[in-house]
Structures are given as structure tokens and as C-alpha cells.
Image: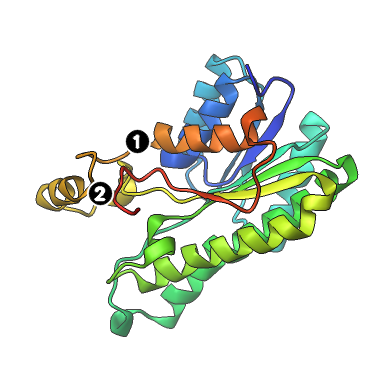
Amino acid sequence: MIMQGQVALVSGASRGIGRAIALTLAAEGASVAVNYRQDRQGAEETSRLARRLGADVLAVQGDVSEPQAAETAVARCLEQFGRLDVLVNNAGTALSSLLVDTGVDDWDRLMAVHLRGSFNLSKAALRPMMEARRGRIVNISSIWGLVGAAGEVAYSTAKAGLLGFTRALAKEVGPWSITVNAVAPGATDTDMLADLTADDRRELAERTPLGRLGTPEEVAAAVLFLVGPGGAFVTGQVISPNGGLVM
């Protein structure tokens, strides 16, 4: 129970990697605020599963790309639990499209969800963290933020931006004993891969040296390390659980 007494806010926690992170932290004793944009049923399921693990849970609806929604999520977390120790910026969306076919609205939406959402939530969370002189922030990026992907230029750009955000913010808030790190998963078996054919999924697994796709729980384990005692002296870093797909 290495997170006993800690409070974590996880954005985009209604499914997939976000749900796995919320449940992993809950299993280790954390109270969890489950943020979601639209999927109320999914958020309620995440909350139910977290409560079964013995955690105190708060579900918070809001599109964190909007400043007010991010501020409200943090305010409700503080009101419910009295503190905020961990922020995981996980909310995101995917887009597979050649750049010449990518519309401005699509581009702007990806930047808003991945970058502006992380900016808004981090800005709101940093106020209580700086007052407490402690905190952990983890940004969920992607291997495509590290190396880029053809057909996913907008997504790769947004995820690469998160890495620059991580490193710069880590330098800025280190004096308050706040760490900021990123996790950049490889091909992970979530519904973001739902559009891939069975052959595409098999090919992706075969390209990975470990011969399979990753799981959301394996990504969550990397997050747990960074926000737990083992990550106390780790900041400005990128951990990439990707099965060797990128080295």
C-alpha cells in the first residue's frame, strides 16, 4: 500500500490506460478522482472497481481542455479529499490521417486535448502542490512522440509537445519538491487500436521484439513507480514501456 494516504487525479480515466492507472493507484491505497469528458458509464465503472479495492473515489466530469473544467476538477478534489498529491495527465484522443488530409479543426482538437488539457490541469494542480511543497505529475505521451509516425503527424506532434512540457516544467517546479515525468507507451491493447485489422495488430506485435502488444496495466505500473517512493529522485524523465519497439 505504497500510496496510502495519497490523493490522485487521473484525467481520461473512464477506460483503457486511464482506468488502469486509477485502479493501480487505488489498489495501492490512494484516493482517486476519476476525470472523464463524456463516458459517464465508463467513469462509473472505473469508480465502482476502485471502490471494490477499498479506495475513496470521486468522479469528475469535464473537458479539461477548457480552463474552467480543469480548475473545477482540482477544486472538487480538494473539497472532497483536502489535498492533491498526484496528477496524471492521461486524457487524449487519436487521429490516423495523412497531413494533407488533416483538417485544421482536427489538428486543433488534438492539440487542445493533449497539450492544452495538460497545461490547464497542471496549472490548477500546481497551486496546492506548491503550497504543500510536494507533488507528482505524470504526463502520458507515446512512442510516436519520441520518433514520430507516418499517418499520425498531428498525434505525434501533440505527444512530442508533452515531452517538452514535461522537461521544462520539471525544471521549473523542482524547487518545490514536485516531480514531473512522462510515460511514453508503445503499442498498447486498448480501444484506440480498435480500427486496426487483425492483420495490422499481428504485424504490430511482430515488429515488437517482445512479440506482443502491451497492456494498460503495464503502463500503469510505470506510472506507479514514478509517483511512488521509488520515483522520489526522478524528474524530467521519460519512461517508455514499449516492448523494445523503440530503443
Q: Residue at x 68, y 63 (%)?
A: 168
Residue 206 lies, in percent from the top left, at 15, 46
Within-10-Å neighbours for mark 2: few <14, some 14–19, many 20+ = few
Does residue 235 appear left or right of residue 202 in this picture?
right
Q: Residue at x 62, y 56 (%)?
A: 64
Q: Is residue 241 at least partly visible in the picture?
A: yes
Q: Nearer the viewer, residue 152 or 42?
A: 152
Describe the element under mark 1 as helix, strand or loop.
loop
Circle 2: residue type: Ala
Instruction: Say whether marks 2 and 1 touch (CB < 8 Å).
Output: no
Within-10-Å neighbours for mark 1: few <14, some 14–19, many 20+ = some
Q: Residue at x 62, y 51 (%)?
A: 62
Task: Tell me where residue 171 sits by quadrant.
Answer: bottom right
Residue 190 lies, in percent from the top left, at 33, 42
Vertical placement of residue 8 versus 148, above or below = above
**Residue at the right extreme, as displayed:** 131
Residue 80 lies, in percent from the top left, at 78, 31
Tell me how far mark 2 sits from mark 1, CA to CA.
Answer: 14 Å
Q: Is residue 33 at least partly visible in the picture?
A: no
Which mark is drawn over residue 215?
1
Does residue 184 appear left or right of residue 58 in this picture?
left
Describe the element under mark 2 as helix, strand or loop.
loop
Which mark is drawn over residue 194?
2
Task: Tell me where residue 132 sits by quadrant.
Answer: top right
- Image quadrant in which the N terminus is located: top right
Circle 1: residue type: Thr
Q: Nearer the viewer, residue 117 or 148?
A: 148
Query: Can you tell which of label 2 and label 1 is closer to the viewer?
Result: 1
Task: Tell me where residue 177 sits by quadrant.
Answer: top right
Residue 154 lies, in percent from the top left, at 41, 72
Does residue 230 appear left or right of residue 95 in this picture?
right
